[in-house]
Amino acid sequence: MDITHEKQLKLKGLLASMGSAAVAFSGGVDSTFLLASCKEALPGALVAVTGRSLSFPERELKAATDFARSRGITHLFVDSEELGLPGFADNPPNRCYLCKRELFKKIRDTARERGIERVVEASNLDDEGDYRPGLIAISELGVGSPLREAGLTKAEIRTLSKEMGLPTWDKPSFACLASRFPYGERITPSELKKIDLAEEHLLGLGFRQVRVRVHDGGRLARIECDEEGFGLLSDPSLRESIHRRLGEIGFTFSAFDLLGYRTGSMNKTLPGA
């Protein structure tokens, strides 16, 4: 047995020992893998709980709903509007901590109403190598992170997801829309909507891994894409149409980042980064 499947076996043991669990479920690669693994390994009750907010696009909510329904898993929702949290809209460096603490409190309460004490989330081993204040909140609330505990990396999760026939095995990574703002730049409902519309447009044009980061008070859209996306940009008419549509959405300037897509690029705006 290779190391990846040894880790999978460890994960199954961890999940089986819980008896029952509530899975924080976004519909992404990691949480879908965790939910499917729980479905296989848990002997008792299982629920998926998804947070709804302005920073979570409808397309992601629908994907999560469709998957849970397809597997016959009870799917619950909590409304977690981050912009109502004191200080969140100011986008401080601990923004993710404020969000995760509020969200997981609500998930924990929802689980307990169902008689389920264990709440688990889907961060993986790779998440330990970046600035992730949300992981502090998760630890404080006693939320389990079985994928990290089993030592699974993102690449291994994709491999195992493909073997399990999960539709998300090659799904592009996603993070909440609030992560598109430089720290200290105010987050507003109108700017979140602009980002959502811009990314929806780019996805519709064939871009897969894409982020629209906002700068200069929402005037500049800095677009990150993968190598496949850069290939699309050889068409001048496509570039012009992107500029025109983003202008209609409300961006004065639009530009593609030469370094392409990478996670946590806004962490470069932190002091000392």
Image (cartoon, grey):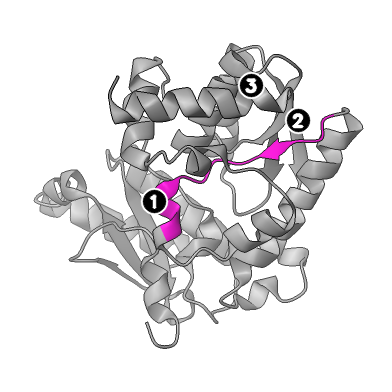
174 or 16, which lies in front? 16
* Residue at disc 1, secondary structure: helix
Give the amino acid type for the residue marked by disc 1 in the picture: Asp
Q: Is residue 254 magenta?
A: no
Is 98 left or right of 185, judged from the image as shown? right
* Range covered by the magenta-colored residues: 116-128
Q: Quadrant of residue 108?
A: top right
Report, in whole angstroms, how far the alpha carbon at label 3 lies from the one at label 2.
22 Å
Query: Mark 2, residues whose alpha carbon is within 10 Å: few (<14), some, or many (≥20)?
Result: some
Q: Give the residue at x 66% y 12%.
A: 72
Q: Report the number of numbered marks.
A: 3
Q: Which mark is residue 76?
A: 2
Of badges 3 and 2, the one in the foreground is 3
Write down the residue under mark 1: 126
- Residue 181 at what x, y percent from top left? 49, 70
N-terminal of the pair, mark 2 or mark 1, is: 2
Is 264 left or right of 105, judged from the image as shown? left
Above/below status of 39 relative to 220: above
Above/below status of 221 relative to 200: below
N-terminal of the pair, mark 3 or mark 2, is: 3
Report, in whole angstroms, how far the alpha carbon at label 2 lies from the one at label 1.
28 Å
Write down the residue under mark 3: 16
- Residue 270 at what x, y percent from top left? 45, 81
Q: Is residue 119 magenta?
A: yes
Q: For the N terminus, which image quadrant?
A: top left
